[in-house]
Each structure stands twice: as C-alpha cells, then as structure tokens.
Amino acid sequence: MEIKILHNFLVLARMANMTAAADFLHLTQPTLSRQLAALEEELGAQLFERGGRRLTLTAAGVRLKKRAEEILELVNKTQCEFRQPENELSGDIYLGSGESWVLGMVAEVMKKLRELSPRVRFHVFSGDGDEVSERLNNGLLDFGLFIEPARVSAYESIRLPEVDMWGALMRKESPLALRDAITPEDLWHEPIIISKQSYMEWHISKWMRREFSELNIAATYNLLYNASILVRKGLGIALGLDRLINVSNDPEICFRPCKPALPVALYFAWRKQNLFSPAAQTFLTMVLNRFKSA
C-alpha cells in the first residue's frame, strides 16, 4: 500500500467526485479509477458507493479514511523529526489533552522550553480521553494529559499536583440553582447531559448511586462548551468540570459543585519505552523536574 495512493484516496474521499479529484491531483480520470480499483482489490473491500456523479464512502471506506489520515499524519511527523538540524534543539512536540484548566500548568513548562529554544513548536490536540489514548497509542501524540478515571496504567505517567472538581451547569431559572451544591438525589429525575467517554459511565454512576441505565440522559458531549449551549437552550443539566465555562457574569447559566465533592486527579502520560525526539525528551525532562517535587 503506497503512501501516494492513500493520499489520492483521501482527496477522492474529501471531494466525493472522480473528475474533480483527478483534476485536483493532475491525473487523468482513468488513472485515478485504476488506482482506486487496485486499492479495493488489495484490501478486498469496496470503498465507495458509486451512484451518479457523487461518490459515498462505504463502511470500509470510512475505516480506511481514518487509518489513512493517521498514517499520513505519522509519516509527516516522522519526516519533520528527521529534518531538524542536529546542532540545535528544534522540532515539533505533540500533546493531547482533555478539557481542563490544569493544562495551564503544563503550558508554563511549554513556554519555558520555547524561551530556551524558540524553534520548538507545540501541537495541541483537544479531545476526550478515548481519543487522546488512541492517538497516543498510534504514535500521533508524544504526550497525553488525562483526567481521572482515565486508564493511565498502560503508560508511564506523573500525577499533577492540582485536581479538577465535578459539578453541574444549569440554567439560573432552575430550582437547583438556589442550592450551594448539588447532591446525587437532586439529579435522579433531571434530564442530564454527560460526557460520552466510555469510562465516565462507571464514575458518574458510582457518585449518583444509580445504574447508568436508570438515569435520564438527555444528551452526551465531548466538549463542555457545546454542552453549555445545550444547557442554555434548556435541554438539561450538564455534568462537567469546574473552571472550563466562565459563568461569573453569565445571565443565563450557573455552575454548582457536587456534594459530596467529586475531585478528579490529572496525569501527564507517555508511552512506555517510547523513543522521543530530542525536543520531546527535553520537554519530558522539564515536566518531570517541575512536577515530581510538587
């Protein structure tokens, strides 16, 4: 499977039209069609539904698109790493993180490294723990910032000194907005908007003392900002971490902490026995020096 063919497949998947994709790639349409046919034969799967002028990805095509994007991203990451001059600290560092104000503590180390080596660049991927873990496992990220109860046992990691606190975002007109804190019983019959991360079901169920299937789940989210929009429109009460949505002067919504308190630890993690670029290794050393004694 050639890198060039995967690139051409992605262009075709994005443009969904054989003629337009061939023109973009400066290929003849028969050439691109032959490449696609050969790729489908190699994989033993049909990648597109051919109906009219527009092409639609099949289930196999969707899977290949995701893998091809990851492969090409890893190829680019590797090429950039080996193009860096050996006599200076430079290059790209890839960090994945869930939503947390604690990222700011790591950003302080990022800033210090940039002050020492201005040609170092950081690329921050924002996603939930499942997405960060997958990209870390596939070599697309050097480091991940995980929020408990993410499964960090598969990685080398260091626990950061601060914690995040769970609570509820709600409209100010809700009767629960009059409380200083929200108990599990308060939410048993309320429509809830909750993180879609697979490991959060157990975490929330344990705190609420209810099976996940017994809760009134109105929606799920992977970015709390989007959940806050649903809250504003009255879809439900969103469970999320504090200090992510600024509600201090918000006329519509407010945040109330959980009671009993539901703190979560944060971990800076990396793959075991990973081979880092000089820039990534320097960054890791600085992070360890900064937080090991904290």
Image (tube, rainbow, N blue to C red):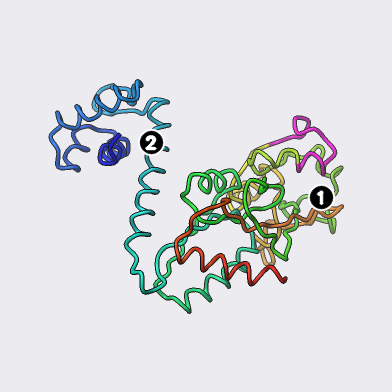
In the image, 52 versus 176, the foreground residue is 52
Q: Is residue 93 above or below residue 188?
A: below
In the image, 179 versus 41, the foreground residue is 41
Residue 9 shown left or right of residue 185 in the figure: left
Residue 241 shown left or right of residue 61 in the figure: right
Q: Position of residue 159 (x, y in %)?
A: 70, 60
Magenta residues? 203-217
Badge 2 amino acid: Lys
**Circle 1 SS class:** helix
- Which callout, 2 or 1, points to the residue nearer the camera? 2
Q: Residue, x 46% and y 66% (percent of image)?
A: 279
Majority SS type along the magenta span: helix
Badge 1 amino acid: Pro
**Splitting the image into 4 quarters, where does residue 50 fall?**
top left
Tell which circle, 2 or 1, labels the residue nearer the N-terminal end. 2
* Residue occupying the far bottom of the picture: 115
C-alpha separation, residue under disc 2 versus residue under disc 1: 47 Å
**Circle 2 SS class:** helix
**Residue receiving disc 1:** 175
The disc at residue 65 is 2
**Splitting the image into 4 quarters, where does residue 154 fall?**
top right
Pointer 2 and pointer 1: residues touching (CB < 8 Å)? no
In the image, 34 versus 236, the foreground residue is 34
